[in-house]
Image (cartoon, rainbow, N blue to C red):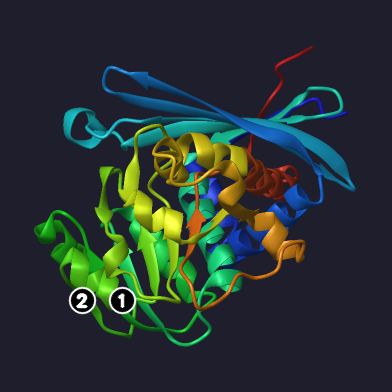
Amino acid sequence: MANETLIITQDEIKQALDLNDYISIIEQTHACHAKGQVYTPDLLHADVHQGEFHLKTGGLIYPDGEYYGVKINGGFLNNTRNYQLPNILGIIYICDAKNGYPLAVMDSVTISKLRTGAASAVAAKYLAPQQPIQLGVFGYGSQAEIQAKAISKVRQLEHIRISGRNMEKATAFAAQLQKEFDIPVTCHSLEETARSSNLIITATPARGYYLKKEWINPGTFIAAVGADSPGKQELQPELVASATIVADIKSQVCRVGESQHALKQGLITPENIYAELGEIVTGQKALPSTNGITIYDSTGTALQDISIGVTIYKKLKQTECTKIKLFY
């Protein structure tokens, strides 16, 4: 049994894995979920005066060990302005699921950001059009950047269009992202971006929809990333109801994902959610028709966080990273 707990920093996390690693691990993780090789994931959401907390739990059963973990993230949109702190802060705690020993504590921000982009890439690998992609990105934060980079790992991009409710910020982000790509990256209105895209990423903290059903072409794949807590919304409920919905975790998207709004309005029932991503990855569910609209409802799951965390733990446990003894 391990007798030390690793304390893993953000810098160590950034050096441990690249984006391709994340995509591969997340794909395997959703396959494990579909095969029942997990401890059931769950989440708790709590609002506080200046922000919110997400607490996500779950575990994975591997041939060489069983692991259980908890991620707690705080989201505070005014942190940078008021406190010179990141708007998202948190930790991941991983323990041995056979005896409860704490194996590692690590920063969650980098892992959360990259695994979210990786999950969209896995979904796009199976669900997005095969032809060259006209990518529409709604949002202009760090998650929007990671999403574009992750999608480029699984599909050939021809053009990236950026949009958002603040066009000044969207224009600046497009200029920044252009430095990372050798294809056109341009800024457009919400409607023009939607109508011109066959793969759409929504990555904003919006609490009211801005993407309308009438703007979306048949055959479009949408990765809806922003809605991960009660009240958050980016897509018109009628758009959600008209699409084939693939969830990361079905029970979660009904509570906190884009699907929550269509459910509340009676436009869909939980049975209308076609599949979980792991069922698509493993072939337990057939790929949906490419003629319709497909939505990946992404709320994020501890299984993603823990699988990445366990991989990093295994890689670093024999190195000189910080280790402490909590029990004697």
Q: Does residue 75 lie above or below 109 as drawn?
A: above
Q: What is the crowding at mark 1: few (fewer than 14 residues within 10 Å), some, or many (at least 20)?
A: many
* Residue at which label 2 appears: 186
Q: Position of residue 64 (x, y in %)?
A: 89, 46
Q: Earlier in the sequence, mark 2 or mark 1?
A: 1
Among the 4 quarters of the image, the one containing residue 167: bottom left
Task: Determine the secondary structure under disc 2.
Answer: strand
Instruction: Tell me, for residue 194, which label it has, or none.
Output: none
Q: Position of residue 15 (x, y in %)?
A: 55, 56
Q: Position of residue 8 (x, y in %)?
A: 58, 38
Closer to the camera in the image, 204 or 25: 204
Quadrant location of the N terminus?
top right
Q: What is the crowding at mark 2: few (fewer than 14 residues within 10 Å), some, or many (at least 20)?
A: some
Dot 2 amino acid type: Thr
* Mark 2–mark 1 distance (CA, rounded to whole Å): 6 Å
Q: Position of residue 285 (x, y in %)?
A: 72, 63
Q: In this image, 227 relative to 124: left or right? A: left
* Mark 2–mark 1 CB contact (< 8 Å): yes
Q: Does residue 249 lie above or below 189 as drawn?
A: above
Q: In this image, 41 relative to 137: left or right? A: right
Please name the residue shown 66% across and 35% down the image: 41
Dot 1 amino acid type: Ile
Q: In this image, 288 relative to 107: left or right? A: right
Instruction: Tell me, for residue 160, which label it has, or none.
Output: 1
> Is residue 150 in view?
yes
Closer to the camera in the image, 18 or 192: 192
Q: In this image, 53 relative to 182: left or right? A: right
> Is residue 301 in view?
no
Quadrant location of the C terminus?
top right
Closer to the camera in the image, 217 or 109: 217
